[in-house]
Image (cartoon, rainbow, N blue to C red):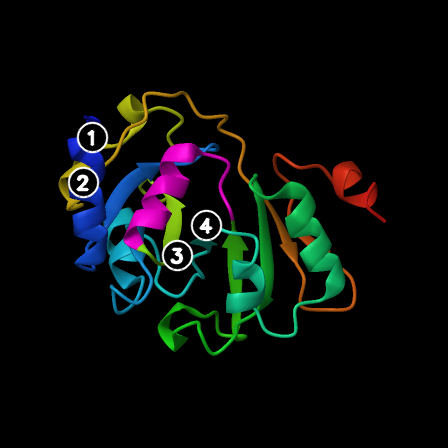
Amino acid sequence: MSYENPQMTQTVAALRAGEPAVYPTETVYGIGVAVGKAASPDVLFDIKKRDHGKPVAWLVGDVDDLSRYGRAVPDFACALARTFWPGPLTLIVKASDAVPPAFRSAEGTIGLRMPNNPTALELIRRVGVPLATTSANVSGCKPPKSFDDIDRDLLDRVAAFLDDDQEKSGVASTILDCTKEHPTVVREGAITIQDIAALS
């Protein structure tokens, strides 16, 4: 008989109900909502005390999700996903019709990443949809590398939380804009420009 983690059960239920939750990735702890279960990511801005309107990237569970949620995805973006996913690389692509308008950027784009964390991937699989995710910190504060680093007030404002008892790298994902002819670095993080250039 397998042991069911009550935190996982509660977090899956909360996300499916459209409520916010805290959970681990390999970089930092994240806070998010399930796409399509929550009407929009607005609650995340309120909890983080951050200005509304900044795009929130999605955590996805499969490399094929790049083509599902991206439109006219260039070959180089697909190659990057095949090489670096799961891992700390966020790819910004034009959003397909499968992306609800409330989750798109003003430019009609979406950022996608497949995390290299088994707990996060299991959570995505069980919820059944991507998770719109940002770091689990109050705006202006340092993103949490461990569960103990998470602000207690922030934890009090989510419906559930999930801890995998592992220290995170603390190094943010690299963000690439893949909406043009060539990728553009929006933020260099755990994957270096040299790593990316080695593909070409």
Residue on which the image places disc 2: 9
Q: Is 124 in the magenta?
A: yes
Which residue sits furthest front? 1
According to the picture, the residue beneath numbered tag 1 turns out to be 5
- The part of the chain drawn in magenta is 114-127
Q: Are marks 1 and 2 in contact (CB under 8 Å)?
A: yes
Mark 2 residue crowding within 10 angstroms, few (<14) / some (14–19) / many (20+): some
Q: Which of marks 4 and 3 is in front?
A: 4
* Amino acid bearing label 2: Thr
Residue 154: x and y in percent read 21, 40
Q: Considering the numbered disc 4 on the image, is that residue within a helix, a strand or a loop?
A: loop
Residue indicated by mark 4: 61
**Mark 1 surroundings: few (<14), some (14-19) or many (≥20) residues within 10 A:** few
Q: Tag 1: residue type?
A: Asn
Residue 133: give x, y in percent of width and height. 38, 50
Give whichever of 187, 83 is nearer the camera: 83
Residue 58 horizontal/vertical position (percent):
44, 55
Who comes first in sequence, dot 1 or dot 4? 1
- Quadrant position of the N terminus in the picture: top left
Q: Is mark 3 on a helix, strand or loop?
A: loop
Q: How far apart are marks 4 and 3 (CA)?
A: 7 Å
Task: Give the number of the disc on residue 130.
Answer: 3
